[in-house]
Amino acid sequence: MTTIIEPFRIKSVEPIKFTNETERKTILKDTGYNPFLIHADDVMIDLLTDSGTSAMSSKQWAGIMDGDESYAGSRSFFRFEEAVKRITGMDFVIPTHQGRAAEKILFSILGGKGKFFPNNTHFDTTRANIEYSGAEAVDLLCEVGKHPEEKADFKGNMDLDKLRAFILEKGPENIPLVFITITNNSGGGQPVSMENIKGVRKICDEFGLKFFIDACRFAENAYFIKIREKGYESKSVLEICRELFSYADGMTMSAKKDALVNIGGFLALNDDKLAMNCRNVLIVTEGFPTYGGLAGRDLEAIAQGLEEITDENYLHYRIRSVEYLGEKLLAAGVPLIEPTGGHAVYLDAKRFCPHIPAEEFPGQAVSIALYEKGGIRACEIGSVMFGKYDEKGKLIPPPMELVRLAIPRRVYTQSHIDYVAEIIIAVFNERHLLKGYKLSYEAPMLRHFTARFELAD
């Protein structure tokens, strides 16, 4: 059958507020043309992020009621710890209130001036936490991953030759650990192959380096391995996850993605000394080691979500639903990263509106047009999020100018996705009318969250 059937029934719904184009033009002007600053009630279809936006299951909500709120030694922690260990095999599990808190703890211990952290592609908060420590975040994405129009099964892979050369150039003593992000969010939600993960492990062993995984979307990545990588087609997603994590020394996780919850995260690692240091920072910044900034009810919901996320019926629906949107857009000629990723469709703003230069933020222009036309909120991943300035103040753009349409898990139906496709195609057909923007305010770090824009001259 070709029809996508959601592997769940809907038990509770919330209304969508409908706005018209005139109202949305006023909203955009009032919020400085930044989708992050738009009131959520004024958004019809919210594809800004898949982080913390999932619909929880009935069993997760039951866990919310059953959570043990004891300050220390909560039974909910031990259920959470067991769920993490069942998937990752890691020895030490440290809960945090979300993924960036895990990153903050890790890089405050291992970071600092003169240190380097290579990755396939760092996402925004990972890069910010590294750079805040004084260290440098370095992206070593494989070449095919930098070309949206080229098709490959694992465009999220790290370039192993560049990794080895980078370690030799900077010296292994200056590289506290090597990171790899699965799936590669900044690179289009593209998966990383098991072969590539094993290759990173081998290089780390060669130089005596630790290897960590940013595992926000580990289950989606494992499903891609199952359907695309030879030798894994008959293995279960859980088996693939266990093998994947067996090659790592540790991991950070935003549970707001593949653990299907609205808040939470964790660090998991095998080094007892590093774990002790992380727990000491945790106690100062987050809370006692058995709650780590979370309520017991949240730990219960994460534990249940980690059980549900490896269900292959769900993962088939999840990956196929994103692919479905991509197919509709490609059929209309809309340029995007091919093939579609696990959690989002990424529009290629460079090809979408080639008349807008990087310094006028083509991705932002497309995002603004999607909201104005149809009330759809999307996220720019390009020169606003990752562009830097040289010593003369000139913008240095990143390799790609993208617009991410992140699909919340178990939230929208096929008719919602059909509407999204209709709006994107309508904007694309009028793309010559799109205009560039310039910054009227920017923060020194993570500017995309709070920046304000105005039309370029």
Image (cartoon, rainbow, N blue to C red):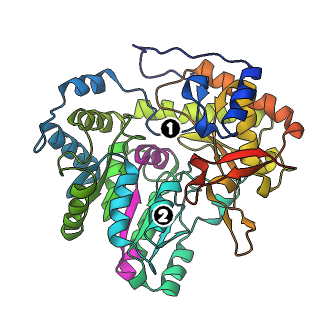
Q: What segment carries the magenta color?
A: 204-227
Amino acid at pointer 2:
Asn
Mark 2 lies on a secondary structure that is helix
Residue 218 included in the magenta stretch of the image: yes
Residue 334 included in the magenta stretch of the image: no
- Give the residue drawn at x 47%, y 59%: 126
| Residue that carries the numbered disc 1 in the rendered image | 50
Amino acid at pointer 1:
Asp
Nearer the observer, 217 or 364: 364
Residue 174 position in % (x across, y down): 42, 82
Q: Earlier in the sequence, mark 1 or mark 2?
A: 1
Tell me the crowding category of disc 1: few under 14, some 14 to 19, or many 20 or more residues within 10 angstroms, Cα based.
many
What number is the disc on residue 366? none
- Give the residue drawn at x 78%, y 30%: 425
The mark closer to the camera, 1 or 2, is 1
**Dividing the picture into quarters, in which one does residue 385 lie?**
bottom right
**Dividing the picture into quarters, in which one does residue 405 lie?**
top right
Q: Is residue 194 above or below residue 98?
A: below
| Residue that carries the numbered disc 2 in the rendered image | 196
Residue 91 position in % (x across, y down): 20, 58
Quarter of the image with the N terminus in it: top right
Q: Is residue 15 above or below residue 309?
A: above
- Give the residue drawn at x 33%, y 42%: 264
Residue 243 position in % (x across, y down): 33, 56
Left or right of 143 on screen, residue 231? left
Residue 427 position in % (x across, y down): 80, 32
- Give the residue drawn at x 42%, y 26%: 55
